[in-house]
Image (tube, rainbow, N blue to C red):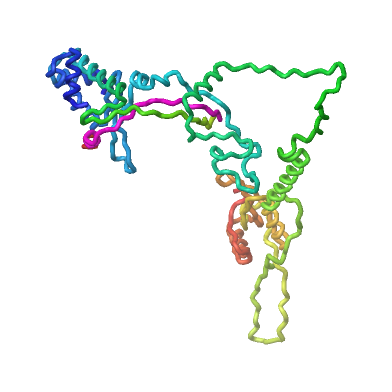
Amino acid sequence: MTRDELLKKCVERGVADEPTVSSVSHLFYVFLLSALQRGQRVEIPNFGTFGTRVIGIKRTRKMPYFEADVDLAGAVNERYRDMKYVVVGRYEEHPLGPGTTYAGKEPPYDPLVDQVGREVIVDTHHEVSAGEVEAAQKKASSPTKEKPDMPKFNLKGEEEEGRTTPPALHDEDEGRGPGPLMQVLIAILILALLTLALHFFGVIRLWGPAEVQQATLPEPVIQQPVAVDTVAPTTPTPVPTEKPKPPVKSKTGSFTVQVSSWETKFKANDEMSRLTAANFDAFVEEGTVNGERWYRVRVGRYESRAEAATAAERLGRMLENGAWVTQVGR
Amino acid sequence: MSHDELVNMISERAGISRQTVRDVLQTITDVWSKELLAHGELSLENIGEFLTEHRPGRKALNSETKEIFLVPPKDGVTFLPSEELIEWSNKS
């Protein structure tokens, strides 16, 4: 419709003279463009709303759109106005669930468009005519009551033709999953695996030697200087090898030497037993670091820090990770 | 921009009373609507083209409630903006 045709039809209705209609229509067009340029919506009652929406990958381009008013949309959709959504069924997934093979084939990727077993198929691409929707709507609005089949009693004891013996009952649970015995066995297996995992990570101790492998820890060797008499050489006498002196034991000392620290008590006790077997006064102390509990393996108690430092130096030479002085209870 | 704001702006710019502007706009939209309903299409100069479009019914599935329902057919309005309107909307 050109602008002249619009002006002619409006003037025919006698709403205003031609210059007035012309200026109003021209200004309407101008204000519509300026509003769309600013990204605003323009509402026109009984007709619709103009607006712009951002499109494109970079979201920089605007595209004008029009939403029809309810009155206009209703007038356009006059013949289907009374039709509404009709629920006709319920989607049911395949009872065997995912992972099932169908006649040697993989299950379908999209069950909505494939016909498989007892699965309800919803073909959303298929067009539905208006007649089908009307029939479904009528059926949904007036549900027919079906007569229930009453049981027939044979009181006279007459033999009915075509009557056969009822089929043998079969197990209905067949194919629906594992039975109760299998479920118990699976539960026991899971518990056993869980217990083994806890034992493996050292949380609990099921079996294993309590004795300590001494071969892994080197024996403490104290090298003593050999006295050489230069004035009167005599026959060299073999230096008697002395056993390593145990560290100074003090039950009341506040200093100690820390050897290692473990997250589990089992590993800490294992380390302590190895040190005890090597004739060290080892013990385990619990401590908390950043909210986590640690088990510290410590050796000896000393009255002064100097004594503890000497012992830590000697221990550090024997152990891989070294040793350091700390205070008992910290 | 609401209808009242549009009427006020046109009235102030053209020096016409608000009631007259309101009546003229109402007449213009009436003419547009009747043209669209009568012919199924309306082509406006420099604005665009309005078309009535038939959308057939179909089956659909509500994935939350698992209900299968029929969507009835519908006649709707489609708007194809003119090149001028698109260009003007993207001017900065």
Q: Residue at x 58, y 29 (%)?
A: A90
Picture coordinates of residue A21, whole percent (x, y): 16, 19
Query: Residue A308 lies in what quarter of the image?
Result: bottom right
Query: Residue B9 lies in what quarter of the image?
Result: top left
Q: Nearer the viewer, residue A71 or A288?
A: A71
Say above or below: A85 vs A321. above
Picture coordinates of residue B76, whole percent (x, y): 37, 26
* Any part of residue A44 in sight: no
**Range shown magenta:** B66-87
Name the side, left or right, on which B2 lies relative to A99: left
Picture coordinates of residue B45, whole percent (x, y): 21, 29
User: Does the magenta run of residues contain A200?
Assistant: no
Say above or below: A98 vs A25. below
Picture coordinates of residue B81, whole percent (x, y): 27, 33
Which quarter of the figure is the N terminus of chain A placed in? Answer: top left
Total of numbered circles in the picture? 0
User: Does the magenta run of residues contain B86?
Assistant: yes
Considering every residue shown, the one lying at the far front of the view is A161
Q: Nearer the viewer, residue A224 or A109?
A: A109
* Any part of residue A280 in sight: yes
Name the side, left or right, on which B24 lies relative to A181: left
Q: Residue at x 28, y 39 (%)?
A: A61
Q: Nearer the viewer, residue A161 or A147?
A: A161
Q: Nearer the viewer, residue B30 or B36?
A: B36
Say above or below: B36 vs A100. above
Query: Residue A292 lies in what quarter of the image?
Result: top right
